[in-house]
Image (cartoon, rainbow, N blue to C red):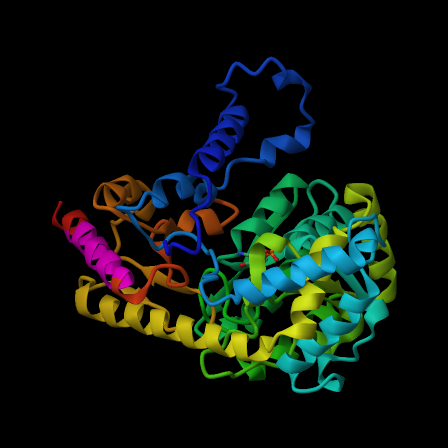
Amino acid sequence: MTPSSPAPRPDALHGAGAAAAGAAAGTTGDPHLDRYAARTTGMTASEIRALFAVASRPEVVSLAGGMPNLAALPLDSLAVEVGDLVATEGQGALQYGSAQGVPVLREQIGEVMAFEAGSLAATGGFAPDDVVVTVGSQSALDMLTRLFVDPGDVVLAESPSYVGALGSFAAYQAEVRHVAMDDDGLVPAALEEALERLAREGRRAKFLYTVPNFHNPVGVSLAPGRRAQVVELCRRYGVLIVEDNPYGLLGFDGQTYESLRSLDPENVVYLGSFSKIFASGLRVGWALAPHGIRDKLVLAAESATLCPPAFTQLVVSRYLATHDWRSLVKSFREMYRERCEAMLGALETHLPEGCSWTRPRGGFFVWATVPEGVDTRAMLPRAISARVAYASGTGFHADGSGARHMRLSFCYPPPERIVEGVRRLAGVLDGELEV
Ligand code: PMP
């Protein structure tokens, strides 16, 4: 933890996680247990959230969480802008607003997308009117699942998948079918097989959920040559694509990828976020969707929250208008590259034989595979005793598989702590392999 970035409130997180887990297990003596809707049975505490409490103790090196590092944010000049926002636009900034989001920010989102895509045209056709501002992309995931998924409907998702998306799918009682990935991302042949199998069953997935760039948790990107294949397959089988892209601007060498949306704008809902390129605590993200889906998203937002907060949207808007945000993105890339290199070097030096891991070119995460017989979920308490935390692979699979994997985050601790964390982790693994 750096002094400028306070730790999350561990007790609060722990309390909420423990309560939710207890309720799901029916162990808390909650007098309301027989009242909850059936869908809440799928709502369990994310393993990762429950981990935050222990992982944020100062003596533990946490390679578990995915918190962006905000140390580079220009807090002084931001404070001036926020003060000025209240002084000069306070009436509007503190008022209810449009459920679709404030127009000025929807315009500026085009600039962010053009920075990634190379030009506005390369985004697949950007119009501010197609954007719905959301409370982080997490709320977009929740709303999209609410819009599309009836209990038992199939959602296709990479194996493994982002834990927050799996949480939304579970909350709406989706049946998640995982599709294999390799070092080049989602495997088109495996996607085709899953689509074909569903067709044989007389079923059709509601959507494919994918994180094509610097994937969470695996760290790899969908190879350029596969993108058109994935889009074409989904089009052929009549399956919508939800393209979740919070890390696309965080390629260490500045490399970016063609969005799936640009290949088929009418069949892709694109999700973006300011969490990793500016400030996760403001909770501002966006969806770019075909008109029909956009309209439904606006209705879903109205019924969930009336509108996203005007204030946080205008803070983002001010930041984009008054700061050299492109340079800041570049400095984030440098910082994360340095941390990733520290992690990869330490893994190479310390991890026992039989372990393997991905070599990300951007984003926040390395995905490691341990030798057969090691169970990363069962090992976690021993790792925490050895003062290192990671996220077990089991949290990233809807069926709880993945125990031979773990996600190692390099985004938050400084390089020397990462190296120390990997050294401790290697010691724990050595112990597991001896027994
Ligand atoms: N999608 C992915 C793949 C993520 O990693 C995250 C954050 N960890 C989110 C969505 C949610 O981001 P936001 O802060 O915009 O809600």
Whether residue 242 is visible to the viewer of this picture, yes or no, is no
> Residue 312, image x and y in percent?
69, 55
Please give the name of the residue rendered at 54% of the width and 63% of the height, measured from the top-left corner: 76
Q: In screen coordinates, is 146 left or right of 339? A: right
Q: Which residue is drawn at 25% across and 49% down?
A: 373
Count of numbered tags: 0
Query: Is 84 left, or right, of 345 in this rendering?
Result: right
Tell me the residue at 53%/75% (across/down): 328
Q: Is residue 427 magenta?
A: yes
In the image, residue 37 above or below residue 207: above
Magenta stretch holds residue 419: yes
Q: Quadrant of residue 343?
A: bottom left
Q: In which quarter of the image is the C terminus?
A: top left
Left or right for 190, reference 203: left
Q: Pinpoint residue 177: horizontal percent, then vertical percent.
A: 58, 53
Please identify the dominant SS of the magenta region.
helix
Q: In this view, does 228 lie above or below 193?
A: below
Spot occupied by residue 90 in the image (x, y as percentages of width and height): 78, 54
Q: What is the magenta range? A: 417-430
Q: In which quarter of the image is residue 210?
A: bottom right
Q: Is residue 398 visible?
A: yes
Q: Where is ligand 1, by quadrant?
A: bottom right
**Residue located 37% across and 73% down the image:** 359
- Residue 151 vs residue 198, the one in the foreground: 151
Residue 2 vertical position relative to residue 330 in the rendered view, above or below: above
Picture coordinates of residue 149, whole percent (x, y): 73, 47
Q: Kindly give the residue lying farthest to the left in the view shown.
A: 434
Residue 341 located left or right of residue 182: left
